[in-house]
Image: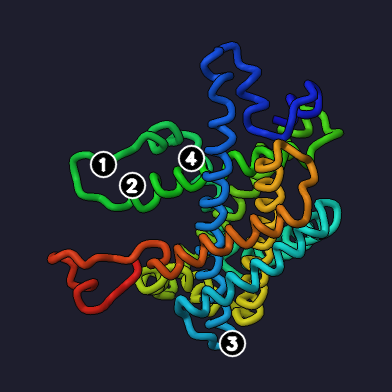
Amino acid sequence: MAFFQFRRGGSALVSTATEALPWRIVQRASPLFNVLAVVATAFGVAASLGMGASQINSGLNAVFGVPIGPWSQVAIIAVTTVLFIGSALSGVERGVKWLSTFNLVLAGLLALAVLLLGPTIAVFDTFTTTLGAYLSELVRMSLRMTPFRDNSRVGDWTIFYWAWWISWSPFVCLFIARVSRGRTIRAFLLGTVLAPTLVGFAWFSVFGGTALHLEIFDAAALTEAVEADVSTTIFRMFDALPFGGVMSVVATVVVLVFFVTSGDSATLVLGMMSTGGTPDPSARVKLVWGVLVAAIATSLMLAGGIRRCRPPPSCSRCRSRASWC
């Protein structure tokens, strides 16, 4: 997208890339791709905003005792919407850039604190072991299904997150292209593929390795937190570490700002896609898209959140109370 937009004079639309393909049927369907990209982005970001509201609600509950529930999360969505619309209206070089830089630094400090205050050696062992497993099992695990046994993990994790990340691809593609003018293709690939991948490896090793070590060797009961409400698990983990209260506050801020930066960049991209690829859509267009994304997220939250469990006859845990699966 960046190449066709800045080197070939194309517009900031998904169709800019598809129109360059040699197949006429794909070229004629290019307007449809733009429509699908708008729909995927709007609902993908709305789902993320709703999930982020659940995580923020759990953080506020752990720190300030704010009750966990749909109306608290609706209020969080409203506040987050005001923040990301304000950031989007201030432009890429101001609000979006400043918030993103601040949050990366804060998230890095949080990860460093967990690494040093948690089981440091175990985290390094986790990093090397799981990196090797990832490289050796990538193809098999990417195509893994469980056709001969009833296993919900494939559906709950593999398929759901695969679809969720695919829905983010048009938005991320256009936004990264929008902010990458002036960089070489080599720097672009290093900054958007290699560096985030390595950071992701480190992040999962620090937080996942710490949580597993606490669960297995220190009886931190994190599994119970996952079964009760997965969004509370990270704060239960912080409770088992020194300065857990401080880290819970920082984590809540990090999650909040992450979703503000996701919202403002998504609002910008939705404005670009709905105005024919305009690099800087008007404030009115950004405002409309921000409100629409927030309304979709609120509707999804009030309709049942991530997924409301319908208790099957064999599920004794769910029969006893309404629960989140």
Most distant residue in the left direction: 313
User: Residue 112 appears at what percent x and percent y?
Assistant: 68, 63
Q: Which mark is residue 146?
A: 1
Q: What kind of element bears circle 3? A: helix
Closer to the chain start, of discs 3 and 4, is: 3
Q: Which mark is residue 295?
A: none
Please name the residue shown 66% across and 61% down the image. 258
User: Which quadrant: the N terminus?
Assistant: top right
Residue where numbered disc 3 is placed: 64
Q: Amino acid at mark 3?
A: Phe
Please name the residue shown 61% across and 16% down the image. 21
Residue where numbered disc 2 is placed: 154
267, above or below 217, in the image = above
Q: Amino acid at mark 2?
A: Val
Closer to the chain start, of discs 2 and 3, is: 3
Please name the residue shown 80% across and 28% down the image. 6
Closer to the chain start, of discs 1 and 4, is: 4
Q: What kind of element bears circle 2? A: helix
- Quarter of the image holding residue 31? top right
The alpha-carbon separation of the residues under discs 3 and 4 comes to 39 Å
Please name the residue shown 82% across and 29% down the image. 184
